[in-house]
Image (cartoon, rainbow, N blue to C red):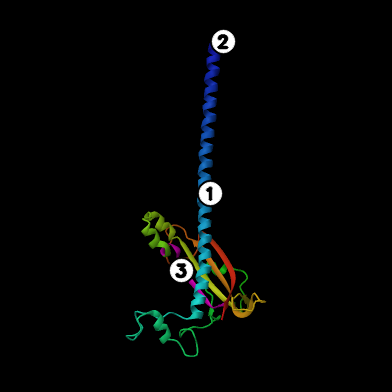
């Protein structure tokens, strides 16, 4: 009788242990899956942040290009036989009174910023009595995946990864906030001086990185899955 009781107790204990182990295994699977999903989300936020930083870089590059002036297009320029390079074409298209190519200028606030998820995420924009914000430039619909697609293709990246990177978009706009003084270092200064104050143009740059939902059209920037806005202030000599 005791042996039967012991066998019955052992069987019940085994079933209880099996149930506990099953529950623990299921919990570990759920935790592992949750951690994996959390890591993926963290990676997506990090990548979106990098795209937003790239937007600020593109904004600064745009302003510098506008201030220096556009390079002549060697394919359409009416060059002479002695102009064998872009450098000589720049010299031909340069005013005698200016060291820069024709077409340069100081970007000023002459256009209204468009209403987008990016521009609406900045609450510190000054508006006029009509509710408009004037900016020097506002560019949208830039696709980060298309930018780096040649690199991914060269590395024989999977099509799935290439399509995933196309979900990342960026946008930027810039506001001319006026003249500002900055310090420029130089070796031609006197030995007693290490820097000189100069006047430049200050611009506040606004950039956003987007991660759009799967299946979103390349021309769509509404309802992003992740949006990271960044801003910075730069002073450009000019």
Does dot 1 land on a helix, a strand or a loop? helix
Q: Quadrant of residue 142?
A: bottom left
Task: Give the secondary structure at mark 2.
Answer: helix
Q: Nearer the viewer, mark 2 or mark 3?
A: 3
Instruction: Give the mark nearer the N terminus: 2 vs 3.
Output: 2
Residue projecting furthest to the bottom:
96
- Counting other residues with Cα less than 10 Å from the Cα at mark 1, is it few (<14), some (14-19), or many (20 or more)? few
- Label 2 vs 1, first from the N-terminus: 2
Where is residue 157, by image quadrant?
bottom left
Q: Give the number of marks.
A: 3
Residue matched to label 1? 38
Q: CA distance from mark 3 to mark 1?
A: 28 Å
Check disc 3: other Cα within 10 Å, few if <14, some if 14-19, many if 20+. Answer: few
The residue lying toward the viewer, choosing from 115 and 74, is 74
Name of the residue lying farthest toward the left: 81
- Residue 125 screen position, x and y as percent: 61, 73
State which region is magenta.
133-146
- Residue corresponding to mark 3: 141
Q: Secondary structure at mark 3?
A: strand
Considering every residue shown, the one lying at the far right of the view is 192
Which disc number belongs to residue 2? 2
In this view, 130 is above or below 168: below
Q: Main secondary structure of the magenta part?
A: strand
Q: Position of residue 114 (x, y in %)?
A: 52, 74
| Magenta stretch holds residue 9 | no
């Amino acid at each position: 009788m005791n042996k039967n009781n012991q066998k019955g107790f052992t069987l019940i204990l085994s079933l209880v242990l099996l149930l506990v182990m099953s529950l623990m295994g299921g919990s570990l699977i759920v935790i592992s899956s949750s951690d994996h999903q959390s890591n993926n989300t963290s990676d997506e936020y990090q990548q979106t942040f990098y795209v937003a930083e790239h937007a600020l870089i593109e904004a600064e590059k745009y302003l510098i290009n506008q201030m220096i002036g556009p390079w002549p297009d060697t394919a359409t320029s009416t060059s002479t036989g002695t102009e064998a390079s872009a450098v000589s074409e720049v010299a031909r298209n340069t005013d005698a009174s200016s060291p820069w190519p024709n077409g340069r200028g100081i970007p000023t606030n002459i256009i209204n910023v468009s209403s987008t998820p990016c521009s609406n995420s900045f609450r510190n924009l000054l508006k006029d009595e009509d509710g408009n914000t004037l900016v020097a430039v506002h560019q949208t619909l830039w696709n980060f995946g298309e930018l780096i697609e040649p690199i991914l293709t060269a590395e024989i990246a999977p099509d799935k990864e290439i399509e995933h990177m196309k979900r990342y978009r960026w946008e930027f706009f810039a506001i001319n906030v006026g003249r500002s003084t900055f310090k420029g270092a130089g070796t031609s200064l006197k030995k007693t001086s290490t820097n000189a104050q100069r006047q430049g143009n200050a611009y506040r740059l606004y950039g956003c990185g987007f991660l759009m939902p799967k299946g979103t059209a390349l021309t769509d920037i509404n309802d992003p899955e992740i949006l990271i806005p960044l801003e910075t202030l730069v002073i450009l000599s000019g």
